[in-house]
Amino acid sequence: MSAELFYNGAGSRDRAGYDFVGLRSERVTNLATRYAGLYASYEFTPLLKWITYAVLNVDDRSRAVDSRIVWSVAPDADLIFGVQRFTGGAGSEFATSPDAFQVQIQWYFR
């Protein structure tokens, strides 16, 4: 498990000052000034692992969570089931992002 606090001097503490246009363009931007992040993982068995990343926009209290189950189906292949969940009030950074579900296979070349 690890945690992180991030301060973005170019951001805004007020939702009205968010640069949503910049967010939708190709330049990288963070809208708020204060963020907290968390990474946690747990290995149930050598073949089955759970991983979660979470980001909290401290200024507007919106959240993004990415959680996955990784199953090693072969020595060189992983099957991954994941969900991304976004929550927040109207006008917040993560409120407009749609939730997503995924199934993925990763094959490692030797």
Image (cartoon, rainbow, N blue to C red):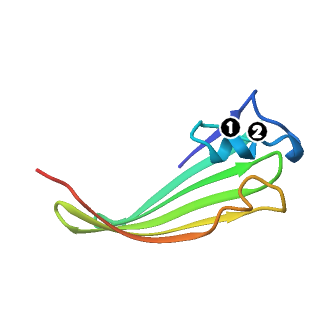
| C-beta proximity under 8 Å, tags 1 and 2 | yes
In the image, is 70 to the left or to the right of 36? left
| Real-space CA distance between mark 1 and mark 2, rounded to the nearest whole angstrom | 7 Å
| Residue at (79% x, 46% y) in the render | 58
Frontmost of labels 1 and 2 is: 2
Q: Position of residue 50 (x, y in %)?
A: 44, 64
Q: Is residue 7 positioned above or below 3 on the image?
A: above
Q: Where is residue 47 in the image (x, y as percent from the top left)?
A: 28, 67
| Residue at (14% x, 52% y) in the render | 109
Q: Mark 1 points at which residue?
A: 5
Q: Where is residue 71 in the image (x, y as percent from the top left)?
A: 32, 69
Q: Which one is in front, 32 or 18?
A: 18
Badge 1, how many Cα within 10 Å: few under 14, some, many 20+?
few
Tag 2, which secondary structure? Answer: strand
- The tag earlier along the polypeptide, 1 or 2, is 1
Q: What residue type is labelled 1?
A: Leu
Q: Mark 2 points at which residue?
A: 34
Tag 1, which secondary structure? Answer: strand
Q: Is residue 11 positioned above or below 66 on the image?
A: above
Badge 2, how many Cα within 10 Å: few under 14, some, many 20+?
some
Give the quadrant of residue 46.
bottom left
